[in-house]
Image (cartoon, rainbow, N blue to C red):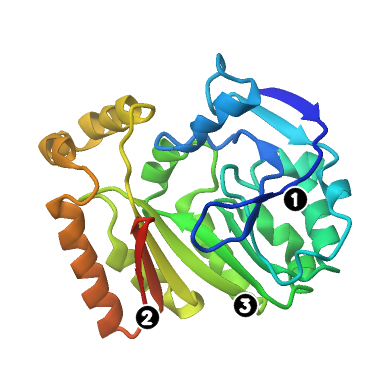
Amino acid sequence: MKIIQKEVKQIITKSNLPDADFVINPYIGCQHSCIYCYADFMKRFTGHSSEKWGDFVDVKINGHETIKNKKFNNSSILLGSVTDPYQAIEAKYKMTQQILGKLVSIQPNLEILTKSKLILRDIDLLKKFNNLRIGISLNTMDDNISKYLEPHASPATSRINTLRELHNAGLKTYLFISPIFPEITDFKALIESTHSFVDKFLFENLNIRANNRSAIYTFIKKNNPNLIELYNELKPGCNYWENLKIQILDYCNSRALKYQIYFNHAEERKN
């Protein structure tokens, strides 16, 4: 793992996401090495064009020092849009922890998205925010599958326990069921296992692109070769995703669950 410390002019940047005005990414790169990750497009802008995504992390060593005023106090900020703010390196550098320390006095509408149990380290700090929601990404309850798909993230069962502990600490939580692997991700089982300590469920489909196609197909051929034909047919708006949307809508509405579907970021359905 190549680790570089670098200084930045500003850690808070404008967002193109539908639910956030701004984003904060304490690191460039991510150690989790998820086989389906889309964020490697960032290499075009960061000088890592020859390096494999997952093999490097740049630490924005002065990021917290660039947060100097309260102009963001009425804004929504997502912490962790193209990196995991609680990846393993955070235990050493504590960039996310220091950023949170600066944001407490600003009190933005803050959202944190992670796959790591390390967030539990900061529970006392997180409880100081008035408007905070914390999301945990998960697409399986099987630790063996999660280990293959997300090699260096916390195991699936650990993430479920993390959601429970955050909830028990009085923090608002959501489960981000993402990305959904057709015929592998059981969204109903995930909901049944977590609904008592999750405030909302978010859903996102698997997006197969040139950068992740080989790794995804290797996984399918090794574990579920009978699904190859289905995966060959997957594309945005295809019948599989449209039918799954209907299933999710019907199930969540029948259970009176709060939910949001991100199968198409330009067109979201929510209750």
Q: How many marks?
A: 3
User: x, y (%) of residue 113?
Assistant: 57, 56
Image quadrant in which you'd find residue 228: top left
Q: Earlier in the sequence, mark 1 or mark 2?
A: 1
Residue 168 badge: 3
In the image, 29: left or right of 126? left
Q: Which secondary structure, mark 2?
A: loop
Relative depth, front residue between 213 and 115: 213
Question: Which residue is at 55% across, 48% downward?
Answer: 154
| Residue 110 screen position, x and y as percent | 67, 66
Say which amino acid is labelled 3: Asn
Q: Amino acid at mark 2?
A: Leu
Sort mark 3 into few (<14), some (14-19) or many (20+) by Cα contacts within 10 Å: few
For disc 2, the marked residue is 257
**Whole-Å distance between the Cαs marked 1 and 2?**
31 Å
Q: Would residue 250 be found to the left or right of residue 265 on screen?
A: left
Question: How packed is label 2: few (under 14 Cα within 10 Å), some, or many (20 or more)?
Answer: some
Please identify the quadrant where the N terminus is shown.
top right
Image mark for residue 44: none
> Separation of disc 3 and disc 2 at Cα?
19 Å
- The mark lying in front, picked from 3 and 1, is 1
Residue type for callout 1: Thr
Q: Residue at x 53, y 56 (%)?
A: 158
Cα separation, mark 3 vs mark 1, equals 22 Å
Q: Residue at x 39, y 69 (%)?
A: 260
- List the residue tagged with mark 1: 96
Q: Is residue 144 positioned above or below 167 on the image?
A: above
Label 3 sits on a secondary structure element that is helix
Residue at 75 percent of width and 61 percent of height: 122
Q: Nearer the viewer, residue 159 or 4?
A: 4
Give the quadrant of residue 211. top left
Q: Residue furthest top?
A: 50
